[in-house]
Image: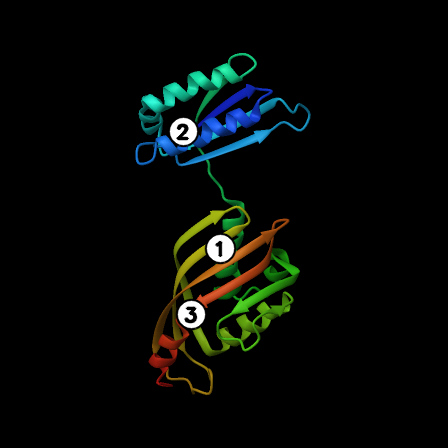
């Protein structure tokens, strides 16, 4: 079970705290078990900070705390704080990446199920699309997805398998495998009734909870080869 430790402290020397964190990161390379660290500053109190540190499990967090570098940095941290920091230990019972969930809706509800009404729910009106199959480097407007989905669904009865997904900041990257049965004209090729497969990666950039920009990279050459174009 994923584990999170929340460190609550006050300091008038944030630069010193940042330098300590940089030093700890450098000295614990290859040894630390922490996977993610996030520091926030209180808007109403500039001396109040909260650090959230993520670990794969409580057991891994214990290993991290036993590192000599961690103990030494902690002692120096206390010296920079106004009072003793407080610690809250949490077992993570729910971890929902909201942008990642929205990205999955594109593949499941829009592309596969063909529910085009969802486009207005998840895409910004001025969405910018980058697609390896398009002559224009950038196409703007959420309607571009309606045309793309309609064209692909008219040519193939297809499904996506989402192989991997990484969310970082405003970006969500999805690695996928597409499998489709050729049932309509596509790129000048008449329907063959055969099943084809290709792999690809899609990166979505979010703004205010909606997809603002998308990059579609996929093995179109491999698909064309399967279709007999090459």
| Quadrant in which the N terminus appears | top left
Mark 2 and mark 1: span between their CA atoms? 36 Å
State which quadrant residue 130 falls in. Answer: bottom right
User: Which is nearer the eye, 221 or 185?
Assistant: 221
Q: Pick whichever of labels 2 and 3 is earlier in the sequence.
A: 2
Q: Name the secondary structure under disc 1.
A: helix
Q: Earlier in the sequence, mark 2 or mark 1?
A: 2
Left or right of 177, for residue 155: right
Query: Residue beneath label 2, please?
Result: 24
Task: Tell which tag, 1 or 3, sits nearer the viewer.
Answer: 1
76 up-or-down from 112: above or below: above
The structure residue drawn at horizontal position 44% and vertical position 75%, both measured from the top left corner, is 156
Mark 1 or mark 3, which has the lower sequence index? Answer: 1
Q: Residue at x 30, y 32 (%)?
A: 31
Does the rendering let one see residue 92? no
Crowding at dot 1, Cα within 10 Å, few <14 / some 14-19 / many 20+, comes out as some
Q: Which residue is mark 3?
A: 158
- Give 121 or 83, whichever is nearer the viewer: 83
Q: Relative to 47, is 51 on the left or the right?
A: left
Label 3: few (<14), some (14–19) or many (≥20) C-alpha neighbours in 10 Å: some
Image location (x, y in percent) of residue 115:
56, 64
């Amino acid at each position: 079970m994923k584990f999170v430790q929340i460190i609550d402290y006050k300091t008038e020397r944030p630069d010193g705290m940042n330098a300590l964190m940089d030093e700890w990161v450098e000295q614990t390379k290859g040894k630390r078990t922490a996977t993610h660290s996030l520091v926030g500053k209180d808007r109403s109190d500039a001396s109040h900070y909260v650090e959230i540190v993520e670990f794969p499990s409580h057991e891994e967090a214990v290993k991290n705390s036993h590192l000599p570098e961690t103990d030494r940095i902690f002692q120096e941290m206390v010296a920079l704080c106004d009072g003793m920091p407080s610690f809250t230990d949490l077992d993570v019972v729910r971890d929902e990446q909201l942008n990642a969930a929205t990205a999955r809706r594109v593949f499941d509800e829009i592309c596969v199920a063909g529910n085009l009404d969802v486009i207005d729910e998840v895409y910004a009106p001025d969405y910018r699309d980058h697609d390896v199959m398009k002559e224009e480097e950038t196409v703007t407007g959420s309607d571009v997805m309606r045309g793309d989905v309609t064209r692909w669904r008219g040519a193939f009865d297809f499904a996506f398998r989402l192989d991997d997904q990484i969310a970082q900041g405003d970006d969500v990257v999805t690695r996928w495998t597409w499998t489709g049965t050729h049932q309509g004209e596509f790129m000048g090729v008449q329907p063959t009734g055969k099943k084809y497969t290709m792999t690809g990666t899609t990166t979505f950039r979010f703004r205010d909870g909606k997809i603002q920009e998308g990059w579609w990279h996929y093995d179109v050459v491999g698909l064309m080869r399967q279709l007999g174009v090459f």
